[in-house]
Image (tube, rainbow, N blue to C red):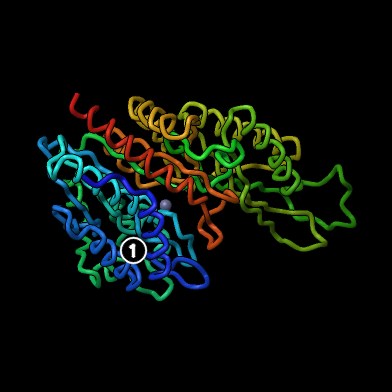
Amino acid sequence: MSALNPKRTVAELKELRALTGDADGAQRVAFTSTWLKAREWLRKQVEGLPLEIHNDAAGNTWFTLRGESEKCLLIGGHIDSVPNGGWLDGCLNVIAGVEILRRINAHYSGKPPVTVRLVDWADEEGARFGKSLFGSSACSGNLDMNEARGLVDKQGIKLPDALKNVGIDFERVKDSHKELKNAAAYLELHIEQGPVLLDLDLPLGAVLGTFGVERHAITFHGQAAHSGSTPMNRRKDAFLAAAKMSPYIYQLAEQHSGVCTIGSCTTRPGIVTSVVEECRITLDQRHLDAAKLATMLAEAKAASEKFAKEGNVKASWERLWQIAPRPFNDDLINLCDESIRETCGKSHRLPSGPLHDAAEVAAAGVPTVMMFVQSLHGISHNKIEDTKEDHLELCVTALDKLAGKVMGWIRR
Ligand SMILES: [Zn+2]
């Protein structure tokens, strides 16, 4: 019986880095030859295990270890990366999953109590076509086909044509949904990509869910006027109203324990000698709680009206994008917490700011949880992305414990 070997996961991560990275970082952009090379490498790592392996209609790769029950424990990740990406984002989840398949296979002599499936999602990052979670949203059924059909990369290649190149028929990608039949639970390990666990000096955390997002453009409409001849009290300064929003959103985020960002500000006419006629800012608000997210949005809207009125200008809003919060399963969060405590003594529960494939699986109604491992520098999507090797080993151990507990949970 072979035991879990977390050191092997670290060695395999380094091997993949050497194979598919360069001086600028990881280069496993989805649907490229480097990505295909990484996937081929992944298949080699599981040689010798009694797995059924196939690519589904959306290009997600499934590794299935049949168990006594048809009910499935899913473990997911993505081997694709952003260009010049880090060595852990996405592939850690998949490679740790391989180690857990090995352990479960050995422990149950090839026949675990429930079926265990590892999935490598296709194009989580959306680096090439600007649309993330491609494979998992096709699988969940949430992919907007009309929008996706029109996506074009920098070379002018359409998404359907790029998919054809790797043997995927775009019009059939949602057939991937049938893979979720019998799915009883979904687990995903990921680097945190933020500084929360680092600041708490904790290696691992249980993830409560992914934030809901409200993304809007707010335009203030005033009047252009000469910057020398117009007295201050006679101005309709669109920028003044927009500027007041900046400190206000910090208050709002603090009051409701969410996050708010004004990420862009453009002015017209945008010259040094004119009062601003039109000022457009973008607002991104995120929260794990749908009601609190709605309140943050309503309060931002009310404030924009108030600031507009004070400055004798008008405000108009345009929704750019929105997604609901995706809370994870309470039982699985508890089991995740327990696995972490058994592994390293202390756990922490935290929401995820970034979206992950897990959000799509949760949206499809499969009980889901994620586990985060600390990120050094709190940074990812960058070649400096890193995690201590002993933390990497701990996360493999904790994920394995969690997989064991969740198999028991599925049986109950
Ligand atoms: Zn990722």
> Which three-letter amino acid code belongs to the residue tagged 1?
Gly
Q: Is residue 84 visible?
A: yes
Picture coordinates of residue 55 (x, y %)? Answer: 19, 59
- Outermost residue to the bottom: 155
In the rendered image, which quarter contains the C terminus?
top left
Q: Residue furthest front?
A: 1
In this rendering, position of residue 91 left or right of residue 280: left
Identified at 38% across, 32% down, the residue is 339
Q: Secondary structure at mark 1?
A: loop
Measured as percent of width and height from the top left, residue 245 is found at: 69, 40
Image quadrant occupied by the N terminus = top left
Q: Quadrant of residue 241?
A: top right
At 20% across and 47% down in the image, what residue appears?
177
Question: What residue did someone put label 1 on?
Answer: 150
Quarter of the view holding residue 126:
bottom left
Determine whether 156 is above or below 358 in the image: below
Taking depth in this image into account, of 138 and 280 the one nearest to the observer is 138
The residue closer to the viewer here, 357 or 163, is 357
Where residue 218 appears, x then y in whole percent? 60, 46
- Identified at 47% across, 43% down, the residue is 373
Picture coordinates of residue 189 (x, y %)? 38, 44
Task: Report whether residue 142 is seen.
Answer: no
Horizontal arrangement in the rendering, residue 184 relative to residue 328 (left or right): left
Q: Quadrant of residue 290?
A: top left
